[in-house]
Image (cartoon, helix red, strand yellow):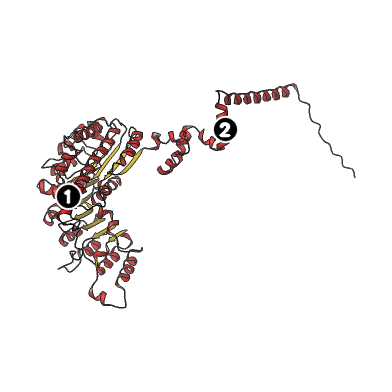
Amino acid sequence: MLLFLSVPQPRLPGARSRARAARVARWRRQRLRGLLRGLRGRPGTGSRRRGRMALCGQAAGAASLPSELIVHIFSFLSAPDRLRASASCSHWRECLFYPALWPQLRISLRVSPAEQPRLEFLMRKCGWFVRELRVEFAAENYLSGGGGPGDGADTGVGGEEVEALQLSTRWLEVLRTYLELVLCVLVSIRNNRNLQKFSLFGDISVLQQQGSLSNTYLSKADPDGKKIKQIQQLFEEILSNSRQMKWLSCGFMLEIVTPTSLSSLSNSIANTMEHLSLLDNNIPGNSTLITAVELERFVNLRSLALDFCDFTAEMARVLTDSNHMPLQRLSLLVHNVSVMHKSLDNMPNDEHWKALSRKSTSLRVYIMAFDIKSEDMLKILKPSIPLERIHFDSYITCVSGAIIDLISRQYDKFLSHFILMNDVIDTSGFPDLSDNRNEDPLVLLAWRCTKLSLLAIHGYTVWAHNLIAIARLRGPDLKVLEVTEESIDFDQGELADQDVDPVHNLIEQVSLGLGQPWHAVMDIESLSVFTEPNRHFYREMQSFSEGI
């Protein structure tokens, strides 16, 4: 059998196909010439570019990316990764501080001269466009190591005088640096009209004596008061220039907010403000940072944080007016210094709290009490307060079992956070809250408050069997249980049992009750709620207000 294959012959190109091929070849030659002219456009340009490509290889492609694409790449990176990526070349470094990449800026600073050049550089780059700025100053980090008053060191009369002089010198240096850093921040944002959230925190508690800063040190750090006046004027200028401000928070800042500062805000900005926080226990006499009349302008407030003595019955009445939005978060600082200088007679009564709760069924209250006597707490804790969080911190005055029992009975429907801190020097004599009581108040708190999710205790005796009972009552719903090791005590019967290790048994039983591994806090210095109560309260207040 023969097999014949027919192979088609190629067609000769016609005139039309030959013209098309000629045009394609001509276009390719023209494109090649254009590329060559681009490389030889300026003397030396082509040689430098070819040399760079030869040395860097693919890096030349990354360096030649358009700025928009580099910014888009940066938007997927964290702040540290952006800084590392910007070190690749000058073009990438120029794109690092593109406004879209830094809508918010959160800075935590030691009050140290070494921080000033870094702060100036960062604020010069971002201060004019940043939309959310949160700055925290920490003086105590700078004063670490070097005995402050009452550190227990026995250095003799001469040694004490030298030590006091050295500490005084360092305090003055910290104050001067603090004022310079605050000025640096305020100057950089004075013309920023896009600022929407502005938060300042200055923990100067280490520089305070009995709750108020000594005027002697302040007058030495700023003899003629020019820097203080400049800071106050800049703060008011920022408020007057703002066009989009929704969040204003200032806590424990030295001499920055005055009773007239809020008057700098225009009515349009005050009417749209959603959060206002003014916490400062150094205001002398009966003066307050905000009055009920001023509060009438803030009709859109969702959250408010004030000194408790500044929150009057008239303010509660203003917040219940029909033209005001329902308030959802209220944080109150009760400080013994404020209670000493200001009266509690003007505080809201139970009817005012009922009216506030009717106005906003979602209103929740956060209270922090510094060294408040039991009789004052009994006046403050009205039954109708929708109390969700309470934090006791004391150096002199201890919280009584009656106060804890009252809290567990009145606020069992709302209470979720309970913090009890007592900074005592003698760890062998912690107060026992269960003395002369059939049931331990802390156990009753865990039993009654079904929403309790955080319990932290230091400086009060917590019996091991009561701690086990608390863990079993609340179970996995108690997300955080922090009790320091020195606060835990054992019954004599538990210690006498030679077959069982009481510490191991406590850890095992509490872990079983909580449904997660648990151990006592071994190092009290690791608890920020103990070492930095002001900062802890301020941060918790911020998250409490943001969690609406």
- Residue 222 shows in the view: yes
Could you tell me the amino acid type at mark 2?
Gly
Disc 1 crowd rating (10 Å Cα; few below 14, some 14-19, many 20+) is many
Most foreground residue, 100 or 298: 100
Q: Closer to the N terminus: mark 1 or mark 2?
A: 2
Name the quadrant of the N terminus.
top right
Is any atom of residue 451 visible in this view? no
Secondary element at tag 1: strand
- Image height of 313 relative to 97, above or below: below
Alpha-carbon span between mark 1 and mark 2: 69 Å
Residue 395's spot in the image, x, y percent?
17, 56
Report the label total.
2
Q: Which residue is mark 2?
A: 51
Q: Which mark is residue 117?
A: none
Find numbered disc 2 in the image and state the secondary structure of the residue it sits on: helix
User: Looking at the image, which is closer to me, 352 or 124?
Assistant: 124
Residue at left offset 23%, top offset 60%: 458
**Quarter occupied by residue 95:** top left
Q: In this rendering, which labeled residue sits more in front, label 1 or label 2?
A: 2
Where's residue 413, x and y in %?
24, 56
The residue at which mark 1 appears reads as 334
Disc 1 residue type (three-letter): Val
- Label 2: few (<14), some or many (≥20) within 10 Å? few
Residue 150, image x, y percentages: 18, 55
